[in-house]
Image (cartoon, rainbow, N blue to C red):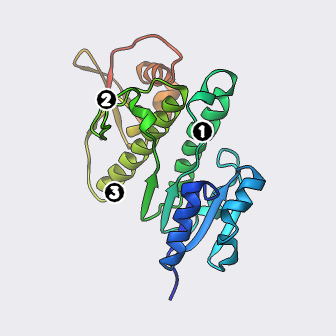
Amino acid sequence: MAHTRSIVTGAAGFIGSHLAAHLIARGHEVVGIDCYDPAIKRANVAALLASPRFRLVDADLATADLGPLLAGADYVFHQAAQAGVRASWGDSFATYAHHNVLATQRLLEALTAHPPRKLVYASSSSVYGDAPLPMRETARPQPVSPYGVTKLAALDAAAEALTLEALERLRRGRTTFIIAHRLVTVRAADMIVVLEGGRIVEQGAHDVLVARGGYYRRLLDLQNGRVGHVAAAPVSA
């Protein structure tokens, strides 16, 4: 009987290594992915390396070829991150953006080709900023540190990926109408209808509308932060 296969990113960290040990104890085959400091990494996973059900891969999620690592995974636990509030200010912010935002986005993109049964993303209390204690998950996210900003940005990417996955399941075998402002939600639609002032100004598939360079393209550029305001809402079918 095949074992359940789980991926743990950040497996050499304190939480990641304990999670991997727990999964192995439950009979999982675990692939740990990490690019942590080698000396600390080996100390944290020394006991895990003795298990035949554990494999440690030294790889940066932002640059590695993730497909072969994710293929066949039942569960993905995304623990990897550049942690620490104080160090996230100043020149080191690029490191936080690399490991917390870009790495998460690349992981999510790779998972679209190898969807697991479940994805678990580890966020941080820093996304809530100076929320009053006791801190609750229902509090409004308003980070006050660069670290918190990168963790919230990655959380938005994770939520968006789960939303798109749910929409794709819903669309199969049926005609679906989606009203959206986030264009990534409708880019796979067979027909996109763009409304401006209550009237249709454009319609077509995503690639056609982008090439046309009209309202849809301008909306796309707006969401990528490249142009000024354009008031139009796409409706897809």
- Name which residue type carries label 3: Arg
Decide if residue 58 is in sight here: no
- Mark 1–mark 3 CB contact (< 8 Å): no
Q: Quadrant of the C terminus?
A: top left
- State the CA–CA distance, disc 3 to disc 2: 39 Å
Counting residues from the N terminus, which is met first, the one under dot 1 or under dot 3? 1
Name the outermost residue toward the front. 133
> Which residue, given by chain and number where applicable, does mark 2 sit on?
132
Q: Nearer the viewer, mark 1 or mark 2?
A: 2
- State the CA–CA distance, disc 1 to disc 2: 30 Å
Residue at the spot x=49%, y=37% of the render?
Answer: 151
Report whether 117 appears left or right of 224.
left
> Which residue, given by chain and number where applicable, does mark 3 sit on?
169
- Mark 3–mark 2 CB contact (< 8 Å): no
> Which residue, given by chain and number where applicable, does mark 1 sit on?
102
Question: Residue 41, how many percent across, how many down?
Answer: 71, 57
Name the outermost residue toward the bottom. 1
Question: Residue 86, how many percent across, how many down?
Answer: 59, 28
Name the outermost residue toward the left. 198
- Name which residue type carries label 2: Pro
Q: Residues within 10 Å of mark 1 (few under 14, many from 20)?
A: many
Name the outermost residue toward the top. 228
Report whether 89 appears left or right of 23.
right
Q: Nearer the viewer, mark 3 or mark 2?
A: 2
Residue nearest the observer in this picture, 72 or 93? 93
- State the CA–CA distance, disc 1 to disc 3: 26 Å
Residue nearest the observer in this picture, 143 or 114? 143
Kindly state the secondary structure of the residue where label 2 is placed: loop
